[in-house]
Image (tube, coloured by chain):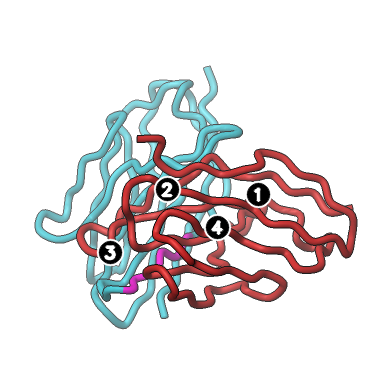
Chain colours: A red, B cyan
Amino acid sequence: NAGVTQTPKFQVLKTGQSMTLQCAQDMNHEYMSWYRQDPGMGLRLIHYSVGAGITDQGEVPNGYNVSRSTTEDFPLRLLSAAPSQTSVYFCASRPDSGFYEQYFGPGTRLTVT
Amino acid sequence: AQSVTQLDSQVPVFEEAPVELRCNYSSSVSVYLFWYVQYPNQGLQLLLKYLSGSTLVKGINGFEAEFNKSQTSFHLRKPSVHISDTAEYFCAVSDRGQGGKLIFGQGTELSVKP
């Protein structure tokens, strides 16, 4: 199993540009989520999904969109990038039932200038 | 809603000394508790988890944590640290519902010096 994969690893955007961060998992996990990590703030939940076709907002959803058309993929879209979205983004997945241990991807480091 | 507070943002310690990283949580429902570790420029790796049963939980790399329901704490300990334990450590809580979201603390940077 590859686990949770994220692309790209690094990205630089200009203010106002849009882009999609990709996340995929091959563990057949129902639950997937996106976090952003900023110094001194830990990881904050952006959006999450409990299965294909179902998404919901986390703590900091503004400026981000998600969709879940398949179990495997959970892309995160930045519609109009802002410098405040400079961060490291992590995708995670876990089984829908059981022990709620989340498996994290390697992260995407995004800089918005 | 749950919240997590890690009481120390940075913990410097000498090699082979004991260490305790403190974590308090607040929740109105029963929770699961986790400690994750993040080595420099890497993703997060699970150290240990408390689900139910014994309040003393043992994890990887010699770490353990104790769940204290009355004090709503889940402190992480290691009796003797190594240079390789230098990393950022995150405490996290999830409610026991089906859609339980994982909420993280702010992180504690452990720096082990020779």
Dot 4 falls on a residue whose secondary structure is: strand
The amino acid on which the numbered mark 4 sits, given as a three-letter code, is Leu
Q: Looking at this rendering, what residue extends furthest in the top direction?
A: B114
Find the magenta span and give its range. B99-104
Q: Earlier along the polypeptide chain: callout 2 or callout 3?
A: 2
Mark 2 is on which residue type? Answer: Gln
Label 3 amino acid? Asp
Query: Separation of disc 4 and disc 1 at Cα?
Result: 9 Å
State the image coordinates of residue B2 (x, y, percent, origin top left).
41, 75
Nearer the camera: disc 4 or disc 3: 3
In the picture of the structure, the residue carrying the numbered disc 4 is A43
Residue A25 visible in rendering = yes
Q: Which residue is mark 2?
A: A25
Secondary structure of the residue carrying numbered label 3: loop
Q: Give the chain of mark 2.
A: A
Residue at image position (89%, 60%) is A15
For mark 3, what is the residue? A96
Let me know if marks 2 and 1 both belong to one chain.
Answer: yes
Dividing the picture into quarters, in which one does residue A108 lie?
top right
| Local secondary structure at mark 1 | strand
- Tags 4 and 1 touching, CB below 8 Å: no
Q: Chain of mark 1?
A: A
**Real-space Cα separation, disc 3 to disc 1, in angstroms:** 25 Å
